[in-house]
Image (cartoon, helix red, strand yellow):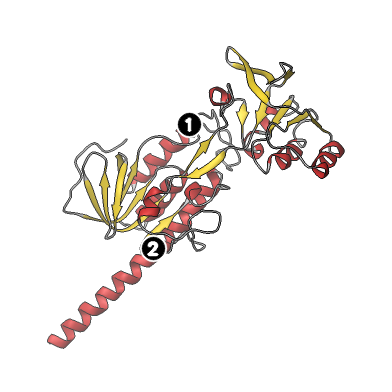
Amino acid sequence: MWEANDVDNGSVYDVVVIGAGAAGLNAALVLGRARRRVAVVDSGAPRNAPAAHMHGFVSRDGTPPAELLAVGRAEVSGYGAELLRARVAEVRPGFYVRLADGRELKARRVLVATGLRDELPEIPGVRERWGKDVLHCPYCHGYEVRDQPIGVLGTHPHSVHQALLLRQWSADVVYFPHHQGPTDEDRERLAAHGVRVIDGAVRRLVVTGDRLHGVELAEGRVVPRTAVFLGPRMVPNDDLLTALGCARDEDGWVTTDATGRTTAFGVWVAGNVATPRAQVVTAAGMGSSAGIAINDDLLLEDVERAVDAHRATAAAG
């Protein structure tokens, strides 16, 4: 599926899309259908690779993430977009997109859809079971662990809210403050909503074979749990945007308009590189909006060039 041929360094793409998740592929689909010349570059390390299935995407609920991407690549290539398996090392103003293997692409516009990375707490068992029975999003995975004994680790300022939310899926939810101690008000809210609080630092997750069995505290006590939720630190993969001088908001995320246009000329973003809240279906929608906006921007430039050429011809005649 991925193009293995050398890139024609002398040609110019209308758009180079960096990242081939739902956001990047949906943007490429829109642009390909608009008959734009598009290259999609991806290093092949999707964030949701550990998950067996994705949810909350109408008509695709329960689809394995890899299957969704494979179908998307086939659709995109069917409209003439070129798919390149490579890592982008640098984007220079202009836009010159240099790949890690030394190849270079020239583009009129760039869409960055490189997603984010989850920085997990250094608790034994967390990384091993991440995306399986150690989870983050209740809307993505809550239904699959409904009515099970669920634990929530206090690893994030919103962990208490996560514990309260998970009561919608299970009557047996335990909040482990770990190093994120709840306030007195939080404790009251948790108790009122039926969430137990078990204090103490978490030593490890108890994993036997291919299954989570519980949460072990520093004191040695093991609390049986078959699913654990936590909030990772989400860090956007935005080094390329930093180098291009894109402005950021007070939380450190790149500033955009409603279509994903950044403050740098000709640079758009879509998906989790722009917001930590985008699910797969959200990211796909962001890619669609960005693709339409980029095509409109190119159209204005095309028309301006045509008008200049028309005036020059009229003046010469």
Furthest-left residue in this view: 316
10 Å neighbourhood of mark 2: few (<14), some, or many (≥20)?
Answer: some
Look at mark 2 in the image and give the residue it sits on.
264
Residues at marks 1 and 2 touching, judged by CB atoms closer than 8 Å: no
- Viewer-nearest residue: 168 or 305: 168
Left or right: 64 in relation to 291: right
Image quarter of the C terminus: bottom left
Image quadrant where residue 150 sits:
top right
Left or right: 239 in relation to 85: right
Image quarter of the N terminus: top left
10 Å neighbourhood of mark 1: few (<14), some, or many (≥20)?
Answer: few
Image quadrant where residue 110 sits:
bottom left
Amino acid tagged 2: Ala
- Viewer-nearest residue: 92 or 149: 92
Give the mark, 1 or 2, whose residue is nearer the N terminus. Answer: 1
State the image coordinates of residue 132 (x, y, percent, origin top left): 58, 25
State the image coordinates of residue 123 (x, y, percent, origin top left): 59, 25
Query: Which mark is drawn over residue 221?
Result: none
State the image coordinates of residue 62 (x, y, percent, origin top left): 57, 33
* Residue positioned 71% across, 28% down in the render: 151
Left or right: 32 in relation to 216: left
Please identify, in this view, whether the residue under mark 1 or under mark 2 is nearer the observer.
2
Amino acid tagged 1: Ala
Q: Is label 2 in a helix, a strand or a loop?
A: loop
Look at mark 1 in the image and give the residue it sits on.
49
* Residue positioned 66% across, 28% down in the render: 228
Relative to 22, does residue 45 appear above or below in the rendering?
above
